Amino acid sequence: MSILMQNIRNKASKIATTRWLPEFPERLKGGRIEKWKNYWGGVKRDYIEATEDVIKSSKESPFKTTIILGISGFLGYCVKSNPTLEDYKLNYLDNSLDILQVNETIRNKKSENLQNYISRAMNANLIRRNNYGLFSIIWVDDFAPELAVFAARCEYIKPTTSDLRARLIDVGFLGRWWISSRKMLEFDVNDDEWDSVTGMPVQPSGQLKQMW
């Protein structure tokens, strides 16, 4: 690791001492071209000095550098994997297909109710996404954006940030929609058919039948 750092430092020093452009003739000195050259030369020196400072700090505190790089990498991954509104629509379609393949008598009511609510909101064009860089939230608006009535256009009665808690239907983080994923864990288990205390069927004669 020390040899690599030394090589990087030597190359940075070599670049710093290398002249990019030849000296300007007397008739061009003080003009826009020379000012442009001096500006970018200063930018080059600043970046080289910053690189040398980072390398020096990394050698002095390797553990701190590792922590900073790890946190930076994690935050970068969060930004890259932040799901979009299209991802949410695809997730909704996948969940709907899963529920449709299950008989109505054994569907989980919480899963089915969430999908029905999302369906109505999508049909009315009320689904909204707020992007916070690292994560996203999906919430339900009152009116479609193309609606031109007063209540839909007035800025003073539009939902505020404090109202999003009651309107929130999902949170996207690390490439996953967490609320819908939790609701769909047991989409093929009807809680009404089983006793929550004993775990036994509520109506054994009607629920448990011999298959052969």
Image (tube, rainbow, N blue to C red):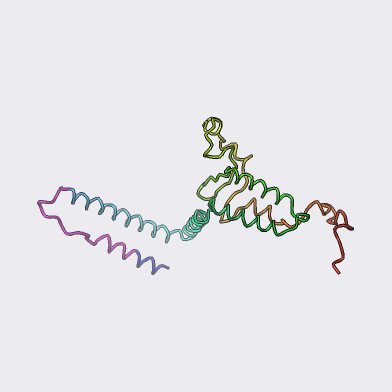
* Residue at far right of view: 205
Quarter-of-image position of residue 123: top right
- Residue 134 versus residue 60: which sits nearer the camera? 134
- The picture places residue 114, in percent across and down from the top left corner, at 68, 48
Which residue is at 33% across, 55% downward?
47
| Quadrant occupied by the C terminus | bottom right
Task: Say if the magenta span includes residue 211.
Answer: no
| Quadrant occupied by the N terminus | bottom left
Which residue is at 56% across, 56% downward?
175
Quarter-of-image position of residue 167: top right
- Residue 35 versus residue 124: which sits nearer the camera? 124
Residue 67 shows in the view: no
Quarter-of-image position of residue 8: bottom left
- Residue 143 versus residue 70: which sits nearer the camera? 143
- The picture places residue 124, in percent across and down from the top left corner, at 59, 43
Magenta-highlighted residues: 9-31
In the picture, measured across the screen, residue 167 lies left or right of residue 73, that is: right
Is 65 placed above or below 163 here? below
Task: Say if the magenta span includes residue 10.
Answer: yes
Is 79 placed above or below 11 here? above
Which residue is at 71% across, 56% downward?
187
- Residue 74 versus residue 89: which sits nearer the camera? 89
